[in-house]
Image (cartoon, grey):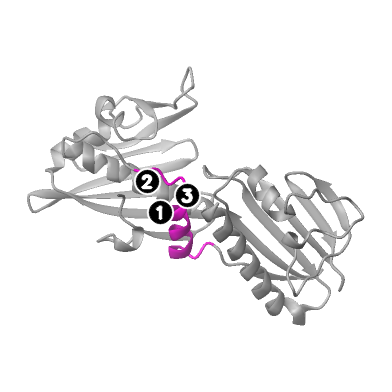
Amino acid sequence: MTPHPEHSEHPDTITTADGRTALRMERRLAHPPQRVWDAITQPAHLAQWFPSEVTVELRPGGAMGFLFPGDSEPAMTGTVTDADEPRVFAFNWGEDHLRWEITPDGEGSLLTLVHTFGDRYGAASFASGWHLCMAALAQHLDGERADVRRDTGGELHEAYVERFDLGRGVVEHTAAGSRIRFERQLVRPVETVWSELTAGSEPLEGEPAPEGFTTPATPPGPVTELHAPDLLAYAAPAGGEVRWQLTKGTGHGPRLNLTQTLPRPSDAEATLSAWQTRIDELAATLRKG
């Protein structure tokens, strides 16, 4: 069984600055630095635990290619930025940057990954993915066949959402008024999310929004815009608009973007709290489904 993130000896963390987020993960491995270096840089070893096949020119400025299962040619390319054997291996992967650092730790090593990217709300997807990859790496180094249970239920993903506080909404105050905003990565296909929100009954423009899109603080109003299974907006009875949009996400399912404009800023905190409860309930239901 893959260990829960809260049980890690070194807590996994994220920091965000200037629109970029850095995910930091540390793992102790019972193998010397050179062996770990070979496992994270040589394509034959990478094929046993990394999420894609890799080609690499192991020098600063060297080209990299990433071939995912089912693709006939590399879907992404990268460039090596550091190759200091057996200490540091770093590269660009699309718009992201990955830095692997190996330090001696007794008879073994401490492996540190810093993954820097622009999509803060994708951090739980990246962390849960790397969590499983690093568990597979440890198995490979131990001479075992990498056999890590996939996070099919989203339990690991949701644990990272909680750890990184990625489920919290915000109130934005502008000259045009106040707005509630939530962004959250979900763990089921968009069709499953839509079915849960609509309770299997398709909404219609001009009719009241289904209960799944509402809260006690924001009861249903007439649907003003509808593009199943990606978008539903409705007029809130007290004024303003509620807008649910499901866009492409990071690995597990769609990204939920929910906003509500408010005619009275004094209602913001109560409205925010009600939506927090509703979205947490949705995420928990999807995880169990």
Residue lying at 34% horizontally and 63% vertically, measured from the top left? 6
Residue 141 vs 59, above or below: the answer is: below
Q: Residue furthest right?
A: 206
- Tell me the magenta residue range: 149-166
Foreground pick, 191 / 72: 191
The residue pinned by badge 1 equals 23
Q: SS of the residue at dot 2? A: helix
Q: In this view, does 232 lie to the left or right of 283?
A: right
- N-terminal of the pair, mark 2 or mark 1, is 1
Position of residue 135 measured from the top left corner of the image (x, y, whole percent): 28, 45
Residue 264 vs 188, above or below: the answer is: below
Q: Is residue 164 magenta?
A: yes
The residue pinned by badge 2 equals 130
Q: Residue 153: which disc?
A: 3
Residue 85 showing in the rendered view = no
- N-terminal of the pair, mark 1 or mark 3, is 1
Q: Residue 203: which disc?
A: none
Residue lying at 39% horizontally and 30% vertically, measured from the top left? 52
Amino acid type, residue under disc 1 in the picture? Leu
- N-terminal of the pair, mark 3 or mark 2, is 2
Answer whether labels 2 and 1 touch (C-beta < 8 Å): yes
Residue lying at 59% horizontally and 56% vertically, measured from the top left? 184
Q: Which of marks 1 and 3 is in front?
A: 3
Q: Nearer the viewer, mark 3 or mark 2?
A: 3
Position of residue 91 measured from the top left corner of the image (x, y, whole percent): 37, 37
Residue lying at 87% horizontally and 60% vertically, measured from the top left? 208
Amino acid type, residue under disc 3 in the picture? Gly
Name the quadrant containing residue 129: top left
